[in-house]
Image (cartoon, rainbow, N blue to C red):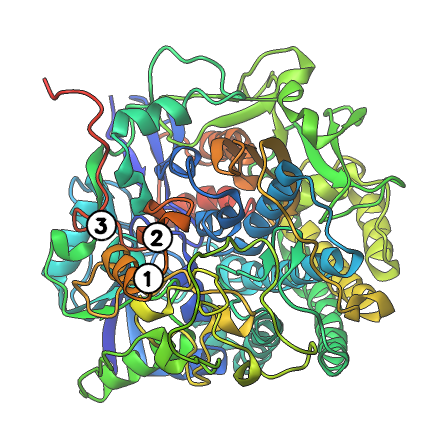
Amino acid sequence: MSIKVAEEWLNACSGCEIAIVDLGERLLDVLNLVDFVHMPVIMDHKLYGQLGDQKHIHIPEADVGILTGGIRNEEHLEVAREMRAQCKTLIALGTCATHGGIPALANSYQNEELLQRIFSTETTDPADALPDDVPEILERCQALDELIKVDVYLPGCPPHPDQIYGALTALLEGRPLEDSGKSVCNDCPTIREGKGQLKNLRRFLQPPHYGTPDEPLDKMRCLLEQGLLCMGSVTRAGCGGDVGTPRCIAARVPCRGCSGPVRHEGNQLLDMLNGLASNGIDIRSLPEHTSLLRFSGAHGLLRPKRTKKEA
Amino acid sequence: MSKLINIAPITHIEGHASIAIQPDDAGNVEDCKVHFQALRGFEKFVEGKPAEELPRIVNRICGICPWHHHLASNKAVDRCFGVTPPPAGRKLRELMQTIAHAEDKLLHFFFLAAADFVIGPDSDYAVRNVIGVAKANPELAQKVVRMRYMAKMILEKFAGKAIHPVAGVVGGFSKPLLEADRQEFLKQMQELLDFALFTIEFAKTRVFPKYLDTIQSLGVIRTGFIGTVDDGGQLNLYDGKIRLMKPDATFTDFDIQDYTDFIGEKVVPYSYGKFPYARAWDEGFSMDLDNPRGIYRSNCLARINVADRMATPKAQAELEEFREKFGRPAQATLLYHWARLIEEVYACEHAIVLLQDPEITDPNVRTAAEPRAGRGVGCVEAPRGTLIHDYSTDENGLVTRANLIVGTTHNLGPINMSVNQAARTLIKDGSVDEGTLNKIEMAVRAYDP
């Protein structure tokens, strides 16, 4: 028997939806096993009725709901609540849904500061008023579980198609999803030699050291031990899919934490700074710190600087 | 006043938008607008971040075209820091971008656009989608899925991440291409080129002929166009000069560093997305259907209109056939679908050209950079249009200011106009049904926003 699936995107980029399409031929198997009842990117089911004449949004009942993106405006919130109401099991897909993702970097600013900049760039003609016939933005960008109950977390920016396939098949077969509790470093093949002499980090402005171009990754020294900021130790494992090798490392590029913290409620910034400091690395050698929360700034972790007293 | 028709969300597109149609008492269209609802604030929140990190932050603007944001951003940062990538580094960026174009166009044509044409615009929404297409044509579906997956896997195998890439780095590319990979990718791209040629032939013989009347009427507007060409006037997706063409086919070429002289953006009350217009034409901004001012379009139709020719033979043959039929510039909105498939052929051919270049396996792929104060405008042709990233940095190489003009936004004004045109033509005397509303959406889908 096929299961009904509803899918919606909120404060999202569509990368998670493309990751679903990137299942390849497995996508055709999935389409045979599930019955999509709502999914705006590929289906014409409408929120306000097929004739656009309803006052309130409606999403059909589903066994599984998939939500991508965080919650940024009133419409996102309305859609998220309707999805929660209609879906038996709700999956937060992607790091925006689980931890705010890159768009939650906006939480470092007041909304007025954002709007002021967006609508006064050097190419923008001065306007009498800001857009108002659009869904009102909320005070900040929030992860789903700040506002609705989430049953399954599947972070990743985007999650690897193998992870999505694994989660969907587990749900179809009624198996619980495993959370390994491991970090990206657990899957990383590079060589770690333990504590070294490293005192300062350098910025990623030149390649890491490795031998010939065809030298396998398991002959390259750990990028953090080479003095490059790499956030693998504070980031949830799994981005490499079935192959396992972390995807950024595969490109010989350090991790920036896109799968969010190892434990759902972790703090990548604190954990990273602690880790560096306890290894004798001067954290002042980082050019700035906000970026350590670039994928997980929801849950109140990133806040505007208090520059003036609240009235 | 009659009840508002709220088509929400617009479906089979890659972003958040809705159409609001206000009929008058007689049931004809009084007012019609397209709301673009996303507001995230990249132009603000990249401030203070190390510039070299931006290519892996701003790619999150779009999960469909992350490679293009990634590379436009890398080009802007290169310029801020005053570094030039070595030839192989530049070519690897271009190769990845070209393959990303190739898979994106297959995605749009088969996954997003095909249902309207293959299943039919008036059919039941429950089957008018890629799932319906796949069930009706299982062999083709399998082939499409396999071909697109193959292109995506080249990106993943070589560059680690296919979506939200990280392998473009300030000063070049993060790793060199090995000879064995080059040969494998070359074979795969040749297979993809065969499929691109099959696809355009399939569309020209089995899809477009049935809809010629619709193509000539639905959402048709008259505008200018923008795109990138090389020094010889050939279409180029990665680099070149920007060509801004008026509706009468006269054009000006300019250097992207000067873009603020040529492009302005209007704030409209019903959209968070701003509406770019041709500031250089000095005629203001108006979306009046009979007398538009400052309106130009981007994306594939725009690119093949502004280009004198295509750089590769099979794409050039397709362009000649297209121009013979529709002239230059071609204005019919649904011709975007046709133009997209011509570009698909080009992207596959051009990827092969790049892969046949012996220099592409040179191990020198990255120039070391030092942070410094500077300004840089980086630009590539994203699938949806001329994509502009403009940054300034302080002496520590931290971003002090960013201005972004994203490919799709050039088309926000034109999308409004095409939808308006379609709604006014199709909704008469109060008769509205699902098929009609879907056809109005087809005027949006052509732009692949």
- Label 2's element? helix
Residue A298 marker: 3
Residue B36 position, x and y percent, is 39, 36
Query: Which of marks 2 and 1 precedes in the sequence?
Result: 1
Residues marked 1 and 2, same chain: yes
Pick the quarter of the image with the N terminus of chain A.
Answer: bottom left
Chain bearing mark 3 = A
Query: Which of marks 2 and 3 precedes in the sequence?
Result: 2
How dense is the environment of label 3, judged by Cα within 10 Å: few (below 14), some, or many (20 and up)? many
> Which residue is at 46% across, 28% downward?
B274
**CB under 8 Å between callouts 3 and 2?**
no
**CB under 8 Å between callouts 1 and 2?**
yes
Identify residue for label 2: A283
Question: Looking at the image, is A76 positioned above or below residue B80?
Answer: below
Identify residue for label 1: A276
Residue A249 position, x and y percent, is 50, 72
Q: Specify whether residue B129 is in view.
A: no
How dense is the environment of label 1, judged by Cα within 10 Å: few (below 14), some, or many (20 and up)? some
Residue A61 position, x and y percent, is 16, 65
Left or right of B44 on screen, residue A260: left
Question: Looking at the image, is B101 positioned above or below residue A240?
Answer: above
Q: Amino acid at mark 1?
A: Leu
Chain bearing mark 2 = A
Q: Amino acid at mark 2?
A: Ile
